[in-house]
Amino acid sequence: MASKLLDAAVVGGGPVGVYLGALLAHGGLDVQVLERRAAPVGHSRAIGIHPPALESFDRIGVTPSILAEGVRIDRGFLRSEGRTFGGLSFNSVSDRHPYIVSLPQHRTESLLAARLEALRPGALRRGVDVEGLKDEGGSVRLRAHTASGTEEVRARMVIGADGGNSFVRTAVGIGVRRHMHRDTYLMGDFTDTTEDGTAAVIWLEPGGVVESFPLPGRLRRWVVHLNRPAQEPTAEELSGLIEERTGIAVDPAGNTMISGFGVRTQSADRMVAARTILVGDAAHQVSPIGGQGMNLGWLDAAALAPILIQTARTGDTDESALARFERRRMRSAAVAANMARINMAMGRPVSGFGLRARDLLLQALLTRPVRGVLARAYSMRWL
Ligand SMILES: Cc1cc2nc3c(=O)[nH]c(=O)nc-3n(C[C@H](O)[C@H](O)[C@H](O)COP(=O)(O)OP(=O)(O)OC[C@H]3O[C@@H](n4cnc5c(N)ncnc54)[C@H](O)[C@@H]3O)c2cc1C
């Protein structure tokens, strides 16, 4: 028996695929989100949810639950060698949401998944590993491996939200430009023993950057630049580096997550190939230093959903709207990638003349008129 024809199938049930699924379900589409993992993972990974994403989440009514669980970061401080250079306030970056919300990625994913389930019960199908894709002209046929064997899913449009190693991207022959950076980082969540409350703090120290962000449950996320590969990281090692560079004592016993990571950035050559479209990390992966990758993907989803809803209503694919979507979203990803590159460069170890030059640059960047521009850039207002 031929499988039923869906309006859309989203491959990948990470934060971007689930949000896109919810937007399409909200628009009345018959959509399935196919996720290879049988159960969600509990890693806190991405934590920053920016104002444009919060405004977009308002469309499907998911923002209140995110605000109820998350911490609102309303300002950030830059410190170096015992001095505070100045601060950025986010209070003018949005009328509705003048803050960045901090929430562990697994909780954000779970709240988005709950919204999708309410809008279209059963639309998120876990344990479905897509391993074949064929564009048949009027529709796309997917072959997937599940616990009960192989099955086929047919859809008018297929969206690859399947992450940096995207199967969908390879299957439709979209190339990718990739770059491995020399920077490595150590990251961990600890009980918050600082006086910094809901502020984000960046220390630009001679030995390398230290970043810290509040998390729910009186925790704080710490990230430090390493000058060597991160091998079997420990909470003791991270807390030692934090104290050495900033003088702040962080108790290793209060650690709830520890991880080391290198930085790979990449950009797909295209986002649209006939009836198959890429979003999120499948299309563009930017450095986590700057914390914008997941948000970029959500903004892809927000831009794409109305086009797919219109396509489902009329039965015609609007190629010029898709071309515009691709152009705009690839431009936004390029801006975010460049910002992240600047963040990484500013956070590398520095000494002597380089240190003085950087201090002068920071003083200039934190003067009143430039500060507002920076706050807008860091809250993704120009994407
Ligand atoms: C340490 C770290 C910190 C970060 N911090 C931030 C931050 O603060 N803010 C921010 O915006 N971003 C941040 N990011 C980036 C963010 O985590 C990613 O951009 C985001 O997870 C991308 O979401 P996605 O849904 O596109 O892809 P993914 O999260 O990779 O999800 C893809 C999903 O597709 C599934 N999948 C893959 N292949 C298949 C297949 N063949 N069939 C079915 N399912 C499949 C996978 O199992 C996965 O669940 C951070 C990243 C890292 C590593």
Image: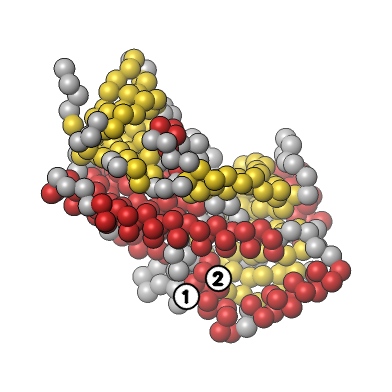
- Coloring basis for residues: secondary structure
Residue 294 percent location from the top left of the image: 47, 51
Q: Of marks 2 and 1, which one's residue comes earlier in the chain?
A: 2
- How dense is the environment of label 2, judged by Cα within 10 Å: few (below 14), some, or many (20 and up)? some
**Which residue bears the numbered disc 2?**
75
Kindly identify the residue that appears in the image at 41 percent across and 29 percent down. 36
What is the distance, in whole Å, between disc 2 and disc 1 at their CAs? 8 Å
Kindly identify the residue that appears in the image at 60 percent across and 55 percent down. 289
Kindly identify the residue that appears in the image at 45 percent across and 60 percent down. 331
Residue 352 percent location from the top left of the image: 86, 69
As drawn, is 322 to the left or to the right of 228?
left
Q: Can you name the residue that lies furthest to the left here? A: 314
Question: For residue 91, which numbered disc appears in the image?
Answer: 1
Does dot 2 land on a helix, a strand or a loop? strand
Asked if the residue under mark 1 is in contact with the one under mark 2, i.e. CB atoms within 8 Å, the reply is yes
Q: Nearer the viewer, residue 66 or 251?
A: 66
Residue 106 percent location from the top left of the image: 47, 43
Does dot 1 land on a helix, a strand or a loop? loop
Q: Amino acid at mark 1?
A: Asn
Quadrant for the C terminus, please. bottom left
Q: Is residue 121 above or below residue 22?
A: above
Q: Amino acid at mark 2?
A: Arg
Regarding residue 137, the answer to whether it shows in the image is yes
Q: Is residue 26 above or below residue 13?
A: below
As drawn, is 287 to the left or to the right of 171?
right
Q: Can you name the residue that lies furthest to the right here? A: 352
Q: Nearer the viewer, residue 121 or 160?
A: 160
Question: For residue 312, which numbered disc appears in the image?
Answer: none
- Mark 2 and ligand 1: say if the CB distance to the nearest ligand atom is below 8 Å: no
- Mark 1 and ligand 1: say if the CB distance to the nearest ligand atom is below 8 Å: no
